[in-house]
Image: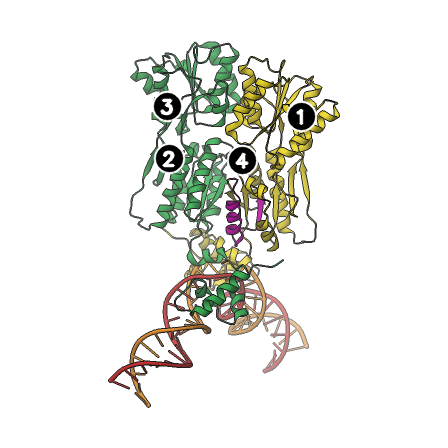
Chain colours: A yellow, B green, C red, D orange
Amino acid sequence: MKKKITIKEIARELDVSISTVSKAMSNSSEISKDTIEKVQAFAKLYNYKPNNIALSLKNKKTKNIAVIIPEIVHHFFTLIISGIEKKANELGYNVIVCLSNESFDKEVINMETMANGQIDGFLLSLSKETLLKKDFHHLREVINQGMPLVMFDRTSDEIYCDKIIIDDARASYNAIQHLIYSGCQRIALITTADYISIGKLRTQGYVNALYDAGIELDENLIVKVDKVEELDEKVKHLFDTEKFDAVFGVNELYAVVAMREAHNRGFKIPQEMSFIGFSDGILSKYSYPTLTTVIQHGFEMGEKAAKMLIDRLETNDDESSFKTEVIKTSILERESTKPI
Amino acid sequence: MKKKITIKEIARELDVSISTVSKAMSNSSEISKDTIEKVQAFAKLYNYKPNNIALSLKNKKTKNIAVIIPEIVHHFFTLIISGIEKKANELGYNVIVCLSNESFDKEVINMETMANGQIDGFLLSLSKETLLKKDFHHLREVINQGMPLVMFDRTSDEIYCDKIIIDDARASYNAIQHLIYSGCQRIALITTADYISIGKLRTQGYVNALYDAGIELDENLIVKVDKVEELDEKVKHLFDTEKFDAVFGVNELYAVVAMREAHNRGFKIPQEMSFIGFSDGILSKYSYPTLTTVIQHGFEMGEKAAKMLIDRLETNDDESSFKTEVIKTSILERESTKPI
DNA sequence: TCTCAACACTAAACCGTTTTCGTGACCCTC
DNA sequence: GAGGGTCACGAAAACGGTTTAGTGTTGAGA
């Protein structure tokens, strides 16, 4: 077991000073060609690599960024992470992934442990609990320390920082419009509780699209699902009590489950009933029939978020004001909707 | 913007020495009650937290572990990560996630950058390219440096270290047996290229189960899929050329795609044709009909892997020989198979 | 011959901690 | 009143690097 070699040991072996070795390694002009060669050859032989921790301490930067997400078992978030990872690595940064598990406390703990020198900046998507509590002291603290923070997807207006969001209201407006253009009239909505800004915004888009098309809003067609466990039951109830010719789900699971129920009840898809979901996961891709979805471009979102954070880290003009970037969505037509 | 306060600044403000502050913070018996109170009160007021980087440098341990996985957009891996994350956090460690994207080079780079002080140990699942190349010098190097390495899921016999694996051969044996018991006779297998140990082992289990049941092996019923792009085509070809009453897919996607094809061709599932997949992802759960699967307990695997690594980190008996732990699989019956 | 610059290198400070090894003040004991 | 012990604290080394500010030697120009 050969331990890692340090600069000090190289210096001793080669009978030069520590500073000479350091400079030789960086091809400093202060050092003679001979010495540089000698040092670098020796370093290569012993596979010397400078200790990153020592560098971090000295340079006051770690080249690490933390991303805190509510859940990783979720296709959209894994796409975002992939995007973040790719861009960050390109720019020479490592990514530390922390999971808040939708818990406020864990989010706070994660931020506090990370903020103590481990990382240079944060990428954050708020947990449900934090959105509910509206307690953002941990974000403020981090920002006050001068550590850059970029929020993505689940953000808050109360915090002043860089943000990357999806225009959920418009995305859902477009989806509903698509359904209407394809001939649907009574469109059901399966959405989440209102405190998740996403559920709220997507509902808004639904309402607006109906309004603009002159279709009267029927509250009975709106199903709010709090926990996954109640999804099945609520969907069944919807089918039992209402008549409709399309369903828009604010995520792919809701749409797929509804589609399955329709299938079980013998509806022809999309002729008798159309479906659109949100976020392009594997469920939509491999459901039967395949599901038309609003695609959110999570990978690009991750890339942009990482770029935004690293830009902020590497330019020190704290003066430049914060930006909010909106990621465009698009609709991917598959088998669950009629062609327009 | 109030910068982070250091121990040195506290010392200056309170007119005591640095060492006194340090000791006071850890309630050392060397320090008088008065001073301890004074220091801690001041520290709390200014929200002092020791700098982790400095601690890492001093203690030669970072309390970070790296997990290198081939892909994150994959339910099984996200389950593993969740398990790792949970256990690691419980034990006071942070998790740094690196993606190799199935690339040998990226795997090497990831390991090299991480090994330089950033982390205390590795959790690794090999990339496809590495499995193909059989080049493990980067693993050996890390092990030689005395850094613990635990491999999970995709491992190699050539490397001597702690491992956590799934008994793929047995799992697939059980699945096939299940199909046979439920009355199936001609069972097709959709698997991956042989160099992925997983594909190989699962194929082996298939072969053995047939043999033990006295069913003759028909090579035409075995479909090897290299890339996802050719999946559809190969599945169609199978349906075009062969007759069979069950399909076993070495992952959930293969099974679901085959099931969809059967559905399209009008087969009654499971009466006329049964399906079992591998790994319990959302696809299986929400496919139509829902898919019976071999569940791999990814979360537990992650937890165990993390525990194994941290145990190795915290006991310094390098003498204790390496363990290989086998995670048991089980079969989750859903709608795509006949009851036994 | 003296001065000055260039060269090639070294010493030491610094980053923020912990920890070992003092050290001065005080009290007690013989 | 000399020696010893305890208390409360401080100085300095160490972790592994980078960087600034010297330093000694050499050669050239005046």
Q: Residues within 10 Å of mark 4 (few under 14, many from 20)?
A: many
Q: Amino acid at mark 1?
A: Ala
Mark closer to the observer (2, 1): 1
Q: Quarter of the image holding residue A196? A: top right
Q: Amino acid at mark 3?
A: Ser
Residue tagged 2: B156
Chain ID at mark 1: A
Q: Which mark is residue A78?
A: 4
Quadrant where the N terminus of chain B is found in the figure: bottom right
Q: Are marks 2 and 1 on the same chain?
A: no
**Sequence-wise first label, 1 or 4:** 4
Q: Camera-side residue: A45 or A276? A: A276
Mark closer to the observer (2, 3): 3
Q: Camera-side residue: B278 or B129? A: B278
Residue tagged 1: A175
**Element type where label 1 sits in the image:** helix
Q: CA distance from mark 2 to mark 1?
A: 48 Å
Chain ID at mark 2: B
Residue drawn at x 57%, y 40% is A84
**Element type where label 4 sits in the image:** helix
Residue tagged 3: B172
Instruction: Check if mark 1's residue and mark 4's residue have beta carbons within 8 Å.
Output: no
Residue drawn at x 54%, y 66% is B9
Q: Are marks 2 and 3 on the same chain?
A: yes
Q: Amino acid at mark 2?
A: Ser
Residue B292, image x, y percentages: 43, 21
The magenta stretch spans residue A122 = yes
**Element type where label 2 sits in the image:** loop
